[in-house]
Image (spheres, coloured by chain):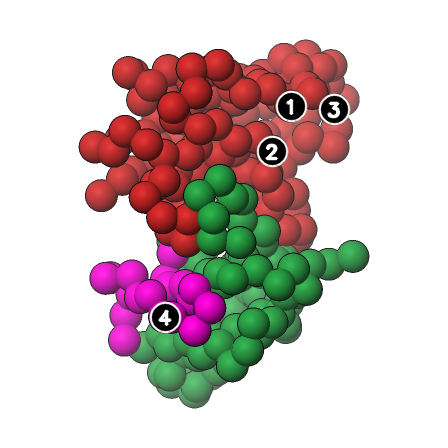
């Protein structure tokens, strides 16, 4: 059974048109992460939530926002997508303990046209 | 800031043979975790193996083992008796042990091809 679910798997959006990617989890984990994975590059952490506490990486563009309305769901909002934002977006969760592993969703492939 | 380097963009191995994927990292921390994740085509990333930096013993999970050299900041993955299902992207990743919520720092990945 899928434990970290990302919807949709594929998203096409227009240049400059706001888009929202969704992630849900059935693991009841405290922490939810968003990573950006461009082609042939390492996945890069954008931000994470520890419960309701939001933690933004220093170099994450302002164009990217996130919301976590409850434990199960987390959203990635891209306010004005540019061509350079085309990527795979990965959601992950963890318990947040010291000795913990991350569980990943299948990702959402975002295309900007 | 920590960095993770995987110098092999692609590796190929015959089925049933052994292959080693390389990973080096840079950090000023003494307490951290290292991971190898597998990402099959169109499927989610899954954990293959994990190593705590304070443990000298190399981690082993069935056919997967690591060679952790802390002084050299090297963390290679050995896959024995390679199987067709091992074909995937493999990512080496680092996480600080300061706090459990810290995210992962990934390498660029190695594409592993299994030749039947």
**Whole-Å distance between the Cαs marked 1 and 2?**
8 Å
User: Mark 1 or mark 2, which has the lower sequence index?
Assistant: 2
Circle 3 crowding by C-alpha within 10 Å: few under 14, some 14–19, many from 20: some
User: Which callout, 2 or 3, points to the residue nearer the camera?
Assistant: 2
Residue matched to label 2: B48
Query: Left or right of B30: which side holds A18?
Result: right
**Whole-Å distance between the Cαs marked 1 and 4?**
35 Å
**Which numbered tag is attached to residue A54?**
4
Kindly indicate whether the residues beneath marks 2 and 3 are on one polypeptide chain: yes
User: Which callout, 1 or 3, points to the residue nearer the camera?
Assistant: 1
The residue depicted at 36 percent of the width and 40 percent of the height is B97
The residue depicted at 62 percent of the width and 43 percent of the height is B46
Q: Which residues are magenta?
A: A45-62
Kindly indicate whether the residues beneath marks 1 and 3 are on one polypeptide chain: yes
Residue matched to label 1: B61
The residue depicted at 43 percent of the width and 20 percent of the height is B55
At mark 3, the secondary structure is loop
Please say if the residues under marks 1 and 2 sit with CB atoms less than 8 Å apart.
yes
**Whole-Å distance between the Cαs marked 1 and 3?**
15 Å
Identify the hue of chain A: green
């Amino acid at each position: 059974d899928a434990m970290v679910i990302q919807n949709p798997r594929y998203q096409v959006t227009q240049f400059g048109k706001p888009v929202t990617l969704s992630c849900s989890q059935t693991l009841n984990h405290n922490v939810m992460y968003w990573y950006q994975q461009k082609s042939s590059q390492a996945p890069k952490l954008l931000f994470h939530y520890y419960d309701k506490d939001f933690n933004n990486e220093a170099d994450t563009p302002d164009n990217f926002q996130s919301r976590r309305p409850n434990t199960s769901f987390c959203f990635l909002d891209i306010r004005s997508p540019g061509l350079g934002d085309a990527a795979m977006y990965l959601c992950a969760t963890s318990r947040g303990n010291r000795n913990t592993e991350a569980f990943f969703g299948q990702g959402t492939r975002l295309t900007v046209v | 800031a920590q960095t993770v380097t995987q110098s092999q963009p692609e590796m190929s191995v015959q089925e049933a043979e052994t292959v080693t994927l390389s990973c080096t990292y840079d950090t000023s921390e003494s307490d951290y975790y290292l991971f190898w994740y597998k990402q099959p085509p169109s499927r989610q990333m899954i954990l293959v193996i994990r190593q705590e930096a304070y443990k000298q013993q190399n981690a082993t999970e069935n056919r997967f083992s690591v060679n952790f050299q802390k002084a050299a900041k090297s963390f290679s993955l050995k896959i024995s008796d390679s199987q067709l299902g091992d074909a995937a992207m493999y990512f080496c990743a680092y996480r600080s042990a300061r706090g459990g919520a810290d995210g992962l720092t990934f390498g660029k990945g190695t594409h592993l091809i299994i030749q039947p």
